[in-house]
Image (cartoon, rainbow, N blue to C red):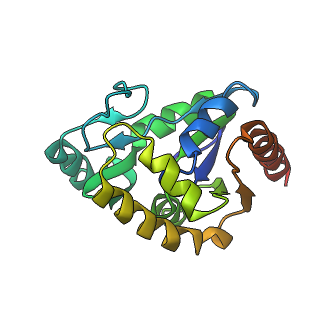
Amino acid sequence: MPLDSGLLVVISAPSGGGKTTVVDRLVGRLPDAVRLVTTTSRTPRPNESPDVDYHFLSRREFAEKIEAGEMVEHVEYAGHYYGIERSRLEALLAGHRYVLAPIDVRGRANIAAAGVPHLSIFLLPESLAVLRERLERRPNAVPEEINERLAIAEREIALAREFDRQIFNREGCLEETLSAVQKAVEELAMS
């Protein structure tokens, strides 16, 4: 995979941990940064737009892309596929300094296993109780899905040390989180 120009920056957090919000806000703060829109087989939530929040595919379409080798990485999470399309990543890396990717822990592990150069930052929630509150505020929140996502979150938090940096994303302190992540990206890009 040609990765000559840009730098992939993976921002991970448990579901509801703020990774998408942080990535979206960093796009305007880091020079020549763009958000990687990942691909999923789930249906859009009421507040989501195709090709803005995710590239939405059917489960069959996603499976065909996996079979054809068109995915840099993919995972199955809560019954749906999530992943990064190779052509989209290559195009963004060719045209931008930073490509910011809000993906989960397994997605980041798959990127590392594929040998894709990247920086990785894990956003830690201040507690699982706060994480539960964030998940419950989502439109169409389902208790069973929330419990499943919290169980996964515990396992993901245990793997945070595998990332280049770990940063707390405290409730009501978004500006503090953004500053810490921006500083980490700039420092890691220089090393």
Report x, y in % for residue 5.
Answer: 66, 37
Report x, y in % for residue 132.
Answer: 49, 56
Q: What is the residue that sits farthest to the left in this orientation?
A: 60
Q: To which quarter of the image does residue 28 belong?
A: top right
The residue nearer to you, when weighing 92 against 52, is 52
Report x, y in % for residue 153.
Answer: 49, 65
In this rendering, would 109 be left or right of 121? left
Q: To which quarter of the image does residue 182 belong?
A: top right
* 110 over 178 or under it: above or below: below
Res 81 visible: yes
Q: To which quarter of the image does residue 98 belong?
A: top right
Res 103 visible: no
Q: How many marks?
A: 0
The residue nearer to you, when weighing 92 against 105, is 105
* 152 over 87 or under it: above or below: below
Report x, y in % for residue 26.
Answer: 69, 33
Residue at 84% from the left image edge and 44% from the top image edge: 183
In this rendering, would 145 be left or right of 182? left
* 158 over 136 or under it: above or below: below
The residue nearer to you, when weighing 170 against 99, is 170
Locate the C terminus by quadrant. bottom right
Residue at 63% from the left image edge and 68% from the top image edge: 160
Residue at 45% from the left image edge and 49% from the top image edge: 135
Residue at 72% from the left image edge and 56% from the top image edge: 168
